[in-house]
Amino acid sequence: MPSIFPPSISGLGQLGKLTSSYPQAHPTLFNRMKVFYKNIPKGQAQPFTPKTIWQRYHARYIATSSPKPLLHFLGVMVPTGYYISYFKGGHYHPRFEFH
């Protein structure tokens, strides 16, 4: 299990000074780690501004754990289910009487 975790390093200047017989302490691996950690963005993350309708909906309702998406789902599905059941269910026809 220790082979997947990098060794404890107090600073980037000490990377070249570390020597070990373990393969995870190889200098080329440390150089790749150094490049990786230098390229990670530092500081506060850029504020995300939603652009599409779905992103605005997600930011407003889903990300805040609001119960409104459930009400929106029911508000769409109940009339849709009624339409499918009434007009497409076989008992309604505009020109023939149902018997």
Image (cartoon, grey):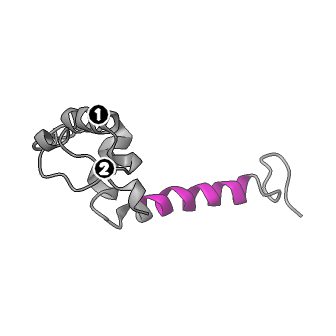
Residue occupying image coordinates x 85% and y 56%:
97
Q: How crowded is mark 1: few (under 14 residues within 10 Å), some or many (20 or more)?
A: few
Q: Residues within 10 Å of mark 2 (few under 14, many from 20)?
A: few
Residue occupying image coordinates x 18% and y 51%:
9
Q: Distance between the residues labelled 2 and 1?
A: 51 Å
- Secondary structure beneath dot 2 equals loop
Indicate the position of residue 42 as horizontal and vertical percent values: 13, 40
> Which is nearer the eye, 17 or 75?
17
Indicate the position of residue 91 as horizontal and vertical percent values: 81, 59
Q: Which quarter of the figure is the C terminus placed in?
A: bottom right
Which residue position is annotated with label 2? 20
Q: Specify whether 73 is left or right of 20.
A: right
Q: Which quarter of the figure is the N terminus placed in?
A: bottom left
In which quadrant of the rendered view does residue 90 lie?
Answer: bottom right
Please state the extent of the stretch shown in magenta in the rendering. Answer: 72-87
Residue occupying image coordinates x 11% and y 44%:
44
Q: Do the residues labelled 2 and 1 touch (CB within 8 Å)?
A: no
Indicate the position of residue 19 as horizontal and vertical percent values: 26, 46
Which secondary structure class fits the magenta region best?
Answer: helix
Q: Specify whether 72 is left or right of 35.
A: right
